[in-house]
Image (cartoon, rainbow, N blue to C red):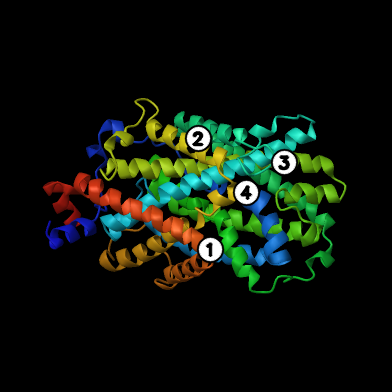
Amino acid sequence: MALAELRTQMLRRKPLREVEEDTPADERLARHLGLWQLTAIGVGGIIGAGIFTLAGSVAHSVTGPSVLISFLIAGVASAAAALCYAEFAGMVPKAGSAYTYGYVSLGELAGWFIGWDLLLEYIAVAAVVAIGVSGYFRFLLEQVNIDLPNWMMGASGTGDGHVVDVFAILFCLGTAFVLSRGIRSVGRFETVTVAIKVALVVLIIVLGVFHIDSSNYTPYFPFGAGAVWTGAATVFFAVFGYDAMSTAAEESVDGKKHLPKAILYSLAIAMVLYVLATLVLTGMQKYTEISPTSGFSTAFESVGMPGIANIIAVGAIVGIVTVVLTFMLGVTRVWFAMSRDGLLPEWFAKTHPTRKVPTRVTWIVGIGSAAMAGLLDISVVAELTNIGILMAFIVVSVAVIVLRRTRPDEPREFKLPFMPVIPLIGIGFSIYLIWSLPWETWVRFAAWLVAGLIVYFLYSRTHSKLESPTAAGLSKSS
């Protein structure tokens, strides 16, 4: 094949405007999500393990009381990217999120890479969070003196006699079942559970503020001021759930208007709660005494409120489950979008005849994340998450700059201010945080991308819907 033709294939762009009626009926998604349901999905993806597990872990061993600053740094980086996502969401309310945004602005190969990247990252996030839910569930069983065999309590190597984490597997499969019931059911479930979760965090803040001892904030930087950047790279995992929510664009009743608002609302709500919760946590206990696995539960136990500690454990399970749901929703919609575009087999793009959700992909993702959660150590799985999401943020930030230059007159429901300063801030923060990650993470990420490159050249470029002459002409005009 001539190099010029290959270059054309790699750079062809998905049309910015597509006529939904041209999509086969069995490849369409049902539209049921309103503004507050979308916001609930975003909040559900952001608030979870970050508050209930990660905040205590980072405060205990990485930053001390200055974990609050780590969350603020991660929040600034995430907010810069969120504004870029919001502009795209108001222009391209299609399934796929960063994959679709990259495809319409930077070309097919860039879109492919970010989509391929997100397939692994979102499944890994779902698995990590399911393992975290399992830990809280085991804590509750211990509280009521239920003793189960060690072999089913965790993956091999995570404890004496551990073989498989049965509860993590069940959480993943249960989430797949909820997703398979239809997006209307998902929206209702997410709205109710997120309301419970937010109410719990507010309760923690309101009760905990009366037990703050200001001496616990000293020293504020026990590991050095530079540790807050390491902490930011770690907690970044907890502040990007809105991007998974944006993959449900086609299931919104008015994606162009609702998605930009839902993205910004969900991040704003989450960051306020994160800042207040970490302020309370590090004020209630000395950072050296904070539990790295169940920080708030042990903090309330330490001030003589064991009943609240148990309520927190129950609420943490409910809250973290919504994160599994959000990211599993995200990966299924990215996979669906890539398959509908022909970059992966179209068999995966078929939706249920009545529920109009991609049930085939949903169950494959559910089983895959269950296997990962049940058989791997949480630290191994967690290393697969941050780098891919940060790469997605970089792509979206670059893409919004490119599209502002190439399509300046395109209608935008939301137009991010201070262009290109804000996208460049997002790119700079993301690059720095990626640089902070261990080299093993880079190796695993590179191996996954090489595998993706092989799949693209052996299958995707020749099966792309843009390969047809009509579509190719349309892509050039877009």
- The local crowd at label 1, few if under 14, some if 14 to 19, many if 20 or more residues have their Cα within 10 Å, is few
Residue sitting at 25 percent across and 52 percent down?
A: 14
Disc sitting over residue 186 in the figure = 2
- The local crowd at label 4, few if under 14, some if 14 to 19, many if 20 or more residues have their Cα within 10 Å, is many
For mark 2, give the secondary structure: helix
Q: Is residue 94 left or right of residue 469?
A: right
Answer with the quarter of the image where residue 254 lies.
top left
Mark 1 to mark 4: distance in Å? 21 Å
User: Does the residue at mark 1 contact the one at mark 4 (Cβ under 8 Å)?
Assistant: no
Q: Could you tell me the amino acid type at mark 4?
A: Ala
Give above or below for 182 relative to 139. above
Using the image as rendered, state which of residue 368 and residue 89 is in the foreground: 368
Mark 4 to mark 3: distance in Å? 12 Å
For mark 1, give the secondary structure: loop
Using the image as rendered, state which of residue 162 and residue 237 is in the foreground: 162
Residue sitting at 83 percent across and 47 percent down?
A: 301
What residue sits right under mark 3 in the picture? Answer: 313
Q: Is residue 345 visible?
A: yes
Which comes sooner in the sequence, label 3 or label 2? 2
User: Does the residue at mark 2 contact the one at mark 1 (Cβ under 8 Å)?
Assistant: no
Disc sitting over residue 49 in the figure = 4
